[in-house]
Image (cartoon, rainbow, N blue to C red):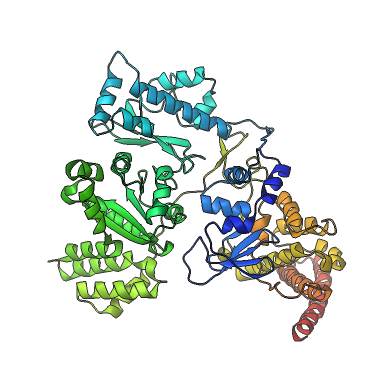
Amino acid sequence: MIGNDQKEQIVQATDFVSLVGETVQLHEKGAGDWWGRCPFHEERTESFHVNANRGLYYCFGCEAKGDVIDFVMRRENLDFADALRWLADRAGIEIRETRGARRGPRRNRVLSCLEEAERRFSRNLLARRDPAGRCDRARAYLGGRSMGREVSLRWGLGFALGGQDLVNHLLDCGFSRAEIAAADLGVERGNGLRDRFFDRVMFPIRDEAGRTIGFGGRVMNDSKPKYLNSKDSGLFHKTKNLYALDRAKDSIIASGRALIVEGYTDAIALHEAGFANACAILGTALTHDHIRLLSRFKPREITSLLDGDAAGQRAAEKALAHLGETEAKLTCVVLPEGKDPAEYLEAYGPEALEAELAGAKDLALFVIDRKVAEAQGSAPGRRRRILGEACAALAPLKGNPIALERYSAYIADAFDASQEEVRRLIREAPVRRDDAGRPAAAFVDGDGPWETERAADAGVIAVEPLPDLGSLPPRQRRRIVLERQFLALLADDPQPFAPHAARIRALSWEDPRHGVIAAVLLDAPVGSSARDRLALARNADPMAPQILSGSEFDRSGEPWNERDASFVMDELELETLRAEARSLQAALKAQEIDDDRTGARALLERSAALRERIAMLESRVRHWTRG
């Protein structure tokens, strides 16, 4: 695990404004207050705020928030521990990871295990002779698909013999059975640990940094399944990773366009033919996380090369769910004769494919036209159902009036319907969301191979996530928001609140972790900086940066004084006492049922004291508001 001292060293060594400025054009509107357009959702106004003094960010549009670690986790699609490592690499800091009290596969060991497996698979393909001649068949299979020795070397292709060939090799190299299993290279069967991949040509799947994080294996005959990927893990997630993105990212930036294909061989064929901006999905539809990942490289256009069959139509409709998630134009190409990109390149060459790409069609218009063709000659009832399907596919555009106007007019004309009816059908259609799964996990020194939440020590202690405010009752939501706003002010400057320390410690908090953070901030050394106080809060609760980053109070003017602090304290205590008063009323009703007069008397006395205190606080709050 990574110690707290080194975590803070990494955070302090990072210029947060400079880091965000790599992908967001920021403007300073006050000392340490920077604003820009949010990198995590499409917007036209600047609602993304970076507080350089505290080292926190908050988007008033999508409510993304946190510290520099949270920002890197979201932008780079990394877990907590990997975000720290990423920042350490950027700052030139060598991480010293200490062993925790519990045991489990370490992430760097699993990565090394995968790298050694790639070397073994490659040797099987390029240099090995086996009695059954399977390695020779693998070489012939790939060679017949224009992936001879040179291409295989460039892409790290290999061959899995299966049985216990790889497992025994990895054990001989010093890897444990737990590490082999965590890398999804071996599975326990009745006769022991066996190779997961058997008699398949192997494609290493790499992350954006070029590290091998999993494998895809393809059979050389008609066996099923045709493709077999590594299972989702803390390193690899099929809905988050894209094959060949490590090679394609620079070209995507340079060309302003990303090409999306459906298989490893198609991606390799495109790169070898000069289309270096191509990457492949890994057995899934295009997901929200894929779009978010690609959007970091600022493509103006994302083009999917689709099959011309019903599966291609379904893939196009699923991709439409992301129309509102990126500024890039979504387009598609269906190659003639039902050929996939590799087959098309072999038959017609790069120039012909370039011409097809030049004629890429707007993805929404492609889906609409396919629906129109499906409706031709249909009975009125079926035609209306297909109209509803076409409108439902455009539901993600509800928030984009310009695009909605354009496409609704197109649908109305194509189906001979009124544009108002089309708009109504689009408005009423639910917005479909893909299920990208839970966040990638972090390998830890723990009982299991990985943890599932951001952890205080980068991978040992699981942390309860923040509540979803939208799902809470209004009163509870108001209390939590008010508590967070108060904590943000306290983190900015504890001094005005010093006279109220006893009141703060006596509060009953809606979220108990808020009380822990408040106590830490109150105990911060006099003269400590906002960043130092954030570090103390982060050590007390790893979710502190997200809790402290979303305050709606205006702190851009004069510094807060004791009068301002008194007003905030009164509001916070008032909400706390009102909640207690409601609980007492419920308890009193229960006492009436039980006929417990002694208990009821004590409750009544407390209730009267609360009413008196609440009335006094309400009067003071009105006074503060008028003053």
Q: 596 above or below 251?
A: below
The C terminus sits in image quarter? bottom right
Check the image and name the residue furthest to the bottom. Answer: 626
Check the image and name the residue furthest to the top. Answer: 131
| Front-lying residue, 27 or 467 | 27
Give left or right: position of 575 versus 170.
right
Give left or right: position of 213 versus 265.
right
Q: 329 above or below 90?
A: below
The N terminus sits in image quarter? top right
Residue 270 rendering spot, x and y as whole percentages: 30, 44
Q: 371 above or below 94?
A: below
| Front-lying residue, 541 or 511 | 541
Query: Which residue is at 73% across, 43% downward?
Result: 5
Residue 365 rendering spot, x and y as whole percentages: 26, 65
Check the image and name the residue furthest to the left. Answer: 377
Q: Can residue 596 be seen in this view?
A: yes
Query: Which residue is at 24% across, 67% downward?
Result: 385
Name the image quarter holding residue 103: top right
Name the image quarter holding residue 159: top left
| Front-lying residue, 254 or 241 | 254
Residue 419 rendering spot, x and y as whole percentages: 28, 78
Name the image quarter holding residue 333: bottom left
Residue 542 rendering spot, x and y as whole percentages: 67, 50
| Front-lying residue, 146 or 108 | 146
Total marks shown come to 0
Query: Which residue is at 22% across, 54% downward?
Result: 356
Q: Is residue 203 visible?
A: no
